[in-house]
Image (spheres, rainbow, N blue to C red):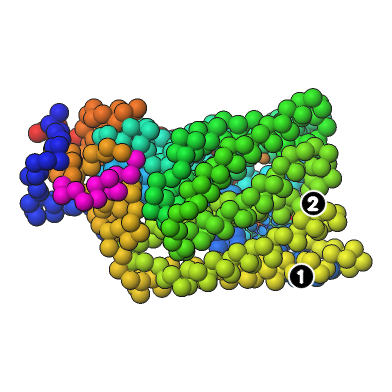
């Protein structure tokens, strides 16, 4: 291996301008129309994931506001009952499967390689494949709403309602096949993230020096790997029940409807942590930057993330307290559900300790994090309340639940996420987002959020069920519902203002420079936006806060010897990140796109006729063959 490192004392033999140009050309993505389907670079794919996820977020958010308008007053007839069912199903499904997971994975795909000092992810073509699968699956899913046959059995799609007998149309079929398909994309991204983090870290970045966001991404990815197969299995079984006539879930013929609930929630509860975990990583990234000092309790934070990852898999039955399962078994899940508050509490205390007495800069990213504190803690408290079986029996399937999960989902994931977007936007686009608009957007979103969702607790306690398209005036729920609807308009205004800010700043934002916030992690050592190859030299890391540690030092230890005429990355050991080998990454190609099209033809065709399974299978096999066709230009040198 020709890779060497200098100690930082003697100056490195810098690349000549031609060599730098060659390095850029090597990592360049193709241009033009066909070129659009070919890039495999991690930052291109990550950016596409994030942008696509936000498109789905705004579409699904619009459905949420339309539902609120329907519920604004008693006996309103703005939406028909059937359309209301389709709306909450598409809203819930899209928010969970098409927005929350992909956006977090997209951010990890974009940021993690730069944070660990890598040039790309471990399997760049798989990464591209995952994106197209997601894009096609999500578009078909939303398309079903436009064409008027969207699924309407709720985001957890319970049988027997979702079975052939009670949901005969195409809608639930689309739900089952597209969910299976899209989850393939979540799995590909998770595998990428795990291998990248474990094998492509810059030399010296031992596990104990990994940035907390990287830890969060790692735990999330492992959770995805263990959780997704459950929903892939259950929705595949439902496809079979519906299309081929098997009886996994039909009780008359020995099937088990509760099996669906077990499998779905075995995925569904960890899903909530899959969404939350990267957000926790974002918070642990933002707080040290805006206090300009190391985070309090690094080890405790890492252990809490890992503990949440494990305990998160032992809670799923708390979604099934009203199904008549044995009492003793349910009690265990009640205890576990209350226990998960411990690692969450530890993290909150570490963050408070980090902020305490620091010179805090109240800029937009930090404001969104502080918003998280208020909202997420409230959602956590109602979470512990509904973990208590007798309480849950009262509020199950009421608006109390709708309030609770929007507090954890929006407070726990969307607020930190938007904070993260304000934080990383300058790196992505080279310009700052407007600070004043950012602050206004925060206050609109924060106030709007609470006005929308706080009254729902009360409505739930008064007995208003979820998933009803209207209610009678005598019940006295009109005023609080009107308040909630007005709040949702303010909330939507806050989110739209951030969208406007992001678009406007593309042209008008102040140029950001490499490191506008004074951050400690490696992505800020690159120019903004970074060149195709991320870091010109792979850095060598000697602490948790590399950029702060090198302040005031003239030169910097780096890895030299990676070639600039092919896509070389440095492979390092799992625990201590010691250099092991140089790997050559594959370049741009159209085959991942064609494979995704072939696979999606199979998945969609199944709805028409089961034999399409073979079309998908052989189509994917053929395109995978082309994709992996050995072409090793470097053999000849
Ligand atoms: C603009 C912000 C939002 C508004 C106004 C909103 C509003 C609503 C409304 C009105 C319902 C239906 C309540 C019912 O009749 O049962 C609902 C359900 C739901 N929402 Fe949201 N929501 C918003 C954002 C989100 C976000 C960001 C997520 C997740 C990340 C989310 C996840 C869900 C889920 C999972 C359901 C349950 C769907 C079902 O019952 O199958 N929502 N939301
Ligand atoms: Cu749960």
Residue found at x 29% / y 31%: 577
Between residue 68 and residue 129, name the one nearer to us.
68
Q: Residue 126 carries which label?
A: none
Task: Give the main secondary structure, helix, strand or loop, of the magenta stretch.
Answer: loop
Q: Position of residue 181 (x, y in %)?
A: 53, 42
Q: Mark 2 points at which residue?
A: 398
Residue found at x 9% / y 44%: 11
Kind of element beneath mark 1: helix
Kind of element beneath mark 2: loop
* Above-or-below relation of 383 to 529: above
- The magenta stretch is 544-555
Let me know if residue 540 appears in the view: yes
Alpha carbons under labels 1 and 2: distance apart: 17 Å
Let me know if residue 591 appears in the view: no
Residue 390 located left or right of residue 263: right
* Above-or-below relation of 67 to 400: below
Between residue 205 and residue 509, name the one nearer to us.
205
Quarter of the image with the N terminus in it: top left
Res 556 → quadrant: top left
Quarter of the image with the C terminus in it: top left
Q: Which residue lies furthest to the right in this view?
A: 474
Q: Is mark 2 within 8 Å of ligand 1?
A: no
Q: Mark 1 points at which residue?
A: 482
Between residue 596 and residue 420, name the one nearer to us.
420
Q: Where is residue 176 in the image (x, y as percent from the top left)?
A: 62, 43
* Above-or-below relation of 166 to 488: above
Q: Earlier in the sequence, mark 1 or mark 2?
A: 2
């Amino acid at each position: 291996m020709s890779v060497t490192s200098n100690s930082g004392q003697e100056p490195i033999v810098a690349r000549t301008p031609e060599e730098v140009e060659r390095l850029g050309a090597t990592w360049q993505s193709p241009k033009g129309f066909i070129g659009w389907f070919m890039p495999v670079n991690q930052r291109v794919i990550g950016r596409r994931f994030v942008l696509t996820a936000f498109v789905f977020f705004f579409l699904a958010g619009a459905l949420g506001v339309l539902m609120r308008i329907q519920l604004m007053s008693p006996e309103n007839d703005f939406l028909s009952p059937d359309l209301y069912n389709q709306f909450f199903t598409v809203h819930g499904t899209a928010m969970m499967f098409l927005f929350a997971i992909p956006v977090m994975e997209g951010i990890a795909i974009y940021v993690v390689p730069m944070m660990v000092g890598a040039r790309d992810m471990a399997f760049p073509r798989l990464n591209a494949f995952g994106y197209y699968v997601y894009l096609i699956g999500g578009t078909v899913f939303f398309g079903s709403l436009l064409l008027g046959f969207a699924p309407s059995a709720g985001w957890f799609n319970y049988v027997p309602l979702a079975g052939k007998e009670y949901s005969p149309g195409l809608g639930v079929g689309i739900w089952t096949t597209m969910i299976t398909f899209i989850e393939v994309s979540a799995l590909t991204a998770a595998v990428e993230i795990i291998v990248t983090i474990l094998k492509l870290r810059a030399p010296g970045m031992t596990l104990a020096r990994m940035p907390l966001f990287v830890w969060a991404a790692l735990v999330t990815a492992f959770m995805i790997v263990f959780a997704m197969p459950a929903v892939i299995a259950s929705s595949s079984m439902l496809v079979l029940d519906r299309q081929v006539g098997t009886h996994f879930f039909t009780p008359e013929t020995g099937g088990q409807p509760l099996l669906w609930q077990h499998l779905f929630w075995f995925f569904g509860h960890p899903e909530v942590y899959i969404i939350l975990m990267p957000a926790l990583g974002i918070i642990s990234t933002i707080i040290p930057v805006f206090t300009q000092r190391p985070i309090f309790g690094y080890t405790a934070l890492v252990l809490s993330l890992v503990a949440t990852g494990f305990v998160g898999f032992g809670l799923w039955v708390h979604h099934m307290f009203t199904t008549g399962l044995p009492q003793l078994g349910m009690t265990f899940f009640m205890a576990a559900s209350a226990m998960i508050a411990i690692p969450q509490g530890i993290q909150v205390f570490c963050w408070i300790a980090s902020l305490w007495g620091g010179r805090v800069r109240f800029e937009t990213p930090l404001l969104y994090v502080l918003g998280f504190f208020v909202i997420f803690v409230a959602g956590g408290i109602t979470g512990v309340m509904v973990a208590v079986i007798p309480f849950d029996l009262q509020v199950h399937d009421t608006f109390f639940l709708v309030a609770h999960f929007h507090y954890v989902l929006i407070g726990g994931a969307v607020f930190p996420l938007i904070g993260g977007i304000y934080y990383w936007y300058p790196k992505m686009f080279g310009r700052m987002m407007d600070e004043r608009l950012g602050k206004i957007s925060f206050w609109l979103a924060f106030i709007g959020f609470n006005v929308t969702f706080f009254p729902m607790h009360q409505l739930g306690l008064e007995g208003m069920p979820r998933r009803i398209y209207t209610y009678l005036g005598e019940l006295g729920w009109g005023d609080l519902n009107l308040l909630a609807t007005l709040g949702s308009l303010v909330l939507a205004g806050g989110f739209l203002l951030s969208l406007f800010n992001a678009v406007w700043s593309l042209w008008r934002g102040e140029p950001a420079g490499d490191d506008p916030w004074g951050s400690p992690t490696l992505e800020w050592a690159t120019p903004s936006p970074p060149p195709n190859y991320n870091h010109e030299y792979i850095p060598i890391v000697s602490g948790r806060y590399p950029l702060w540690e090198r302040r005031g030092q003239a030169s910097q230890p780096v890895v030299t010897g990676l070639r600039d005429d092919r896509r070389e990355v440095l492979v390092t050991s799992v625990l201590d990140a010691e250099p092991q080998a140089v790997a050559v990454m594959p370049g741009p190609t159209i085959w991942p796109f064609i494979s995704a099209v072939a696979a999606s033809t199979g998945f969609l065709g199944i709805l028409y006729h089961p034999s399409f399974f073979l079309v998908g299978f052989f189509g994917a096999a053929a395109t995978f063959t082309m994709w992996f066709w050995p072409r090793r230009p470097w053999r000849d040198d």
